[in-house]
Each structure stands twice: as structure tokens, then as C-alpha cells.
Amino acid sequence: MSPSAISNKPGEVDLADRLCRRVAGFQAFLRGHGFQAGIPEALDAQKLAQFVDITDRRRLRAGLQSLLCTGYREWNRFDELFDAYWLPPNRSVLRESRVSGNKAEKAADLASRPPKGLLADVRQGGGDAAKVGGDDAAQGGASSAESLKRRDFRLITRDDELEALERLVERLARRMRRRMIRRQRVAAEGRRLHLRRTLRNSLQFGGTPIELSYRRRRRKPPQLVLLLDVSRSMSIYTYMLLRFTGAIVHGFKRADAFVFHTQLVSVTDALKERNSERMRDRLMLLSAGWSGGTRIGDSLKTFNERFAPQLVGRRSVVAIVSDGFDTGDPELLSGEMQRLRSRARRLIWLNPLLGRPGYEPTSSGMAAALPWVDLFAPAHNLESLLALEPELVRL
Amino acid sequence: MVTATGFQERLAAAGYIAEAGLAAALELLQALGRPLLIEGDAGVGKTEIAKALARVHDTQLIRLQCYEGLDASSAVYEWDYQRQLLAIKIRETGELSSEQTERHIFSEAYLLKRPLLQAITTPEPSVLLIDEIDRADEEFEAYLLEVLSDFQISIPELGTVPAVSRPYVVLTSNATRDLSDALRRRCLYYYLEYPDFDKELRIIRVHLPDIGSQLARQVVSFVQSLRQFDLRKTPGIAETLDWATAILQLDVKDLGDDPEAIKSLLVCVLKTREDRAAVSDVDFQRLLASSG
């Protein structure tokens, strides 16, 4: 049956009208599920509904899928949502969700999760450290910015010192960002003549500059990927390192951040959240319900399989921030490190413990990982983070 | 109105085996005049789609390969500087005024058309393939968006060049970088998966008509199982075709006839050392047995 056959029937206006409404309703339904389709898509969807024989559901599905999806995630969910909307048995369910909207669903989602999460852990860890390290801090006395820079994060306990440090971390990231932007601007100016070589080339043409030489474009900054260990053994450092990571993600054009202990999860979007309250909530949700222990090998495996193909290339610097205490299989860790090493340009391991006098990287996890690391550096105080800047932007 | 199956058949006649969904998306591309963004793993036949589309419409395929640092001068237009310079030299002694000379050397004769300008100035609608858009910089993506919505290009020395015809635009991406929402919304979208058994079998048959049906089934089944392995470079359709072509040279009717030779030909399919190591002899035997 073709559309013309439909329009020959009596009551055609009614049918076409109903179809338009159904299609519009479907779009509202998709928007409720986080799809982005806007008004131009709505108009085209109406056109499509006229154009395609609507009794041919497969074609309607294929057309709408192509039109309304903008990425793989949406593409994957489309079939399920299409069935939910267009197939009769689910319509009662569908109405409900359309009325109550997306919020109810999210709320239910929230309720089902335990409220305690990553940052709660972190704060608590910081609190413990405060009690332990209280004496050290008292001995430190007044804290100028300079001494703060050199002090181990675990020894910074007073609220005012913490705030001063947070400000310093953010300033560091801002400065790095400014430098990056300046470099990018030079690169964006486009082709520039290499005057000296152009003149030399012109000699063979009697001084007419026939062959122009250009300066090479300044290469773009590398892409950064930070993998942050948030297991309990790292908890005294996690808060500061997360702040630092957040500042980096904000500052660099191409930077991604992940946290792991038994699983691995991307926190790039959460860290980009401007509102710090909301950011904390999102981070908490992301890591809610994880069990204890550290499985660096498994986390890296997840990363290598799911994220590395898109994120890590020849221009990528990958930094793993962890103390190397691993409860998983060292063999697996070593293998995954090798895989990551072969993919990335540079692989950096930052270990907060390295800043402590007398620390030797002898734990089985650390020993398994070290052969594949380009740079093994401390990350226990601000100065060590500052020293990283050239390493992060260099290839 | 063309039906989806009709279009599917036209694509097949042009040597491209497409599933119904893809054919529908390509039809929409014509009906709505929107660009089509195709994503999917390397080697699933994204680029081939544009070529097939050009064959179906019997029109020119204009290809813009994106790379990091791609700029307007290599994507849109460039002045033929050397010829301009020579023209000035020749006219130095002439009686033309400098304005006339200037108008002359900034005329279309001295314009080198690059893919984007070329695509909108062909008399008949062409197929414009923008390959691996994710490799281009974000600034270029923004510029492209402007061209794709207005279909006109402004050249400061000449004025605005409107589109003579509107090209069918196909963009491909390997998702090395996330594309902007604006571009995604502008485009139709299709995610191309690795082909299923039947589709891949048909592709092999179309490209290698000489291959026996037994052998073709075995090759496809072998590669399909191989894709389930944890490989760094999952073999695409091109790899399957290479392998099948190589096996044809051996003059065997069945993969089991000469396992050693066939194993040595696996270089067509497994292209890194790790992948080669990941498929052990035992795996190979098992795959061979199960695809027989």
C-alpha cells in the first residue's frame, strides 16, 4: 500500500492528522529520554511520515532512526524506545512515563542507589588524616604559599590551609590553560611564509618568488588522559588530586579523566560541571556501591577495551595516578600496561608515596607496572604537580 | 516514489550490498537534502557507501579526506599564485591599468577549486564524501557546518559563489573525537555494524564471482568467528575480500584442503603481531573445523 492509496480513503485528513500527532508525540517521548532532536527534525519527521508508507513499519523505523539519532548511544537505544512507543501492548506504560516525565524515573534511580559514594569517602578519609597528621601540621606553623607547595597533601589538615591549597591548584591549572591557549592561537593563524627559504628559492627564477615555502604549523598540544585511583589506600590524596584533575579537564581542550578502584568510570563530564555541589553529587552517584579493594589490572583492561580505541592515539599522554597497591593479578596488570604503552605516546605513572623518604616501589603491582612506564614521578604535593606541567604538554 | 527495496536493488546493481535500514537512510538523504553521517568501526564499508551512491546516480564522486590541520585553502579554494605572478610579469610592459590587471588575475581562471567548491559548482548534483571528519580540527568542522547549511561559499576577491547544484553529502567518522552537537543535529545518522553472515556472503559473491559456494561460506564463517576474538584490529570486509582473493590463488575447493597454506595467508586478516599471537594453532584448528 502506498501513501496515495491511503489518501484516497475517506477520512484522509483525520488519518494524516492523527499520524502527525503520533509522530510528534514520539519525538516528545524521545526528548524525554534525553534525545536532542529539535524543531528542524520535527518538520522533517512530518515530511518523512507523508513520504514513507506508514504501514511499512520497518521503513518508518529506519527513517526515523536515521533522522532522530545523533550518536551511537542514541542509536543503540532507539529500537527499544520505538517499540515502546509504537507497539500497542506497552502503550499504557508509555502514557504514564510521558506524563510523569523523566524526573520520576531519575528519582527512582537515585533512590535505589546507596547515597554514600566517592566524595563522601574522600571527605571522610581526609578527616581521618586530619586526626593523624594534626601534630605535624601544628609543627609546621604559619603556612606561606611556598611551604604549602612543598608540603605533602596528607599533612595539610587545617581548613584555611586546605583552602589556600585549593586556590593554588586552581591557579596552577589556569596558568597551564593560558599557556595552552596561547600556543593554540599561534597554530590557528594558518599558513605562514618561511621568508628566508622563499627568498632562496626565488634565486633560480631571477628573484621572482615562484615557489613559496611555508613554516610548518605548530603541532597541537597532546591529548591527556588521567586515570585516578580512588581506592581507600589513596583516600587522603584523592580529594586534592580530583581537584587538580578537574582543573586540568577544564583547562585543556582535549583531556579526559577516569577514576577507578574495582571498576573504572569516566568522570570527564562530571568534572566539567561548573556548580561544585552538583559536581559532587554526580561524582558520588558515579562511584556509588563499589566494593573495596583495588583492581588496577581489571580497570586498565576495561579502559583498554572500551575507551582507549577512541581516546588514546599517537598524540596521547596517559597518566595513571595510583600508589600501586593492587589486589588483582600482577600478570594481568603487566599485560594491560603493555597494551596501553603500545597505544599511547607517553605513559606516566604518578605515585604519591614516592614523595615519602625511603619509599621503594616494591609492591607486586608497582613492580609489574614499572617496566612499561616512561616517567615515574611523585604526586604528593603541589610542587610535584607543578613539575609535571612540561611533561604533560610535551610529546 | 522509489520503495526501499527498489533502492536496495539499485545499490546492489551498483555493487554495494546494503541492509534495508541503510537504503532507507540514503533515500532520506535525497528526499530531505540533509547530509548523512555514518559511524562505525574501521573496515565496515563506510567509504564504499559514497562510491556506490555516486554509481547509482551516475554522477561524480568528490572526496575530501580530512586530517589534522586541514585548512580552507586545501578544502575550499586556493588562488593559483604562480600563474598569477607570471601573468603580472607578462603584463608589466602592457598598457593595462593596475585595476584591470587585478581584475584579470583574480578571475575564475586563476581559481583552483578544492573539493568543497567543486562539489557545489558541478552542473549535476555530485556526491560529496567528507571522509573521517573526526580527524579535522573543530574550527574546520564549524566552517563545514556553515557551508552545509547555506550551500554557498564566499571568496573575498570574487564575491559569493552560490551552489549550482546541491551535492549529496556523506560524512564518515571513526569516532576518534566527539563531533559537535550542531553537526550531529544537522545530519542524518547511521551506525554501520560489521556485516552479518548473509550480508558478508553476498558481498564476497558479488566481488569474487569465481569463488565456490562452499569455500565462500567457510571463509565468511571463519572471519565472522574471528571477529569474536579480542583483537586489536578486528578484520573488516576489505580483509575478508583480500583473504578470499588470496585463497582463490591456491586453487582449493575447501579450507580443509590445505590448512598450512591457508594459515600462512592469515596475514591478510590479522595485521598486528599481538593479533597473530592471540589466535593460537589450536584456535585456528577449531575455527577451521567449525566453519567447515
Image: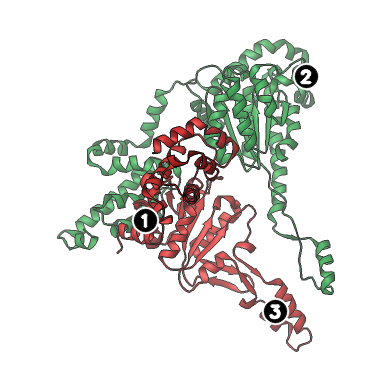
Chain colours: A green, B red
- Give the number of the disc on residue A142: 2
Q: In the rendered structure, which amino acid carries the disc numbered 1?
A: Ala
Residue A274 visible here:
no
Q: Are marks 2 and 3 on the same chain?
A: no
In the picture, the quarter occupied by the N terminus of chain B is bottom left
Residue B245 shown left or right of residue B140 in the figure? left
Counting from the top left corner in percent of width and height, residue A218 is at 72, 51
- Given the image, what chain letter belongs to the residue carrying mark 2? A
Q: Amino acid at mark 2?
A: Ala
| Circle nearer the viewer, 2 or 3 | 3
- Residue placed at 52% from the left, 42% from the top? B261
Q: Quadrant of residue A148?
A: top right
Same-subunit check for callouts 2 and 1: no
Check if mark 3 and mark 1 are on a common chain. Answer: yes
Q: Which residue carries the number 1 mark?
A: B23
Cβ–Cβ below 8 Å for labels 2 and 1? no
Left or right: A105 as drawn, with respect to B133: left
The residue positioned 37% from the left and 56% from the top of the image is: B23
Residue underneath mark 3: B102
Q: Is residue B105 left or right of residue A80?
A: right
Q: Chain of mark 3?
A: B
Quadrant of the frame with the C terminus of chain B: top left
Q: From the viewer's perspective, is the residue at label 3 or at label 1 nearer? A: 1
Secondary element at image label 3: helix
Q: Is residue B275 above or below residue A42?
A: above
Q: Which amino acid lies under the numbered mark 3 shown in the image of this protein?
A: Glu
In the image, which disc is placed on residue A279? none
Chain at tag 1? B
Compared to residue A62, the image places residue A296 above or below, namely above
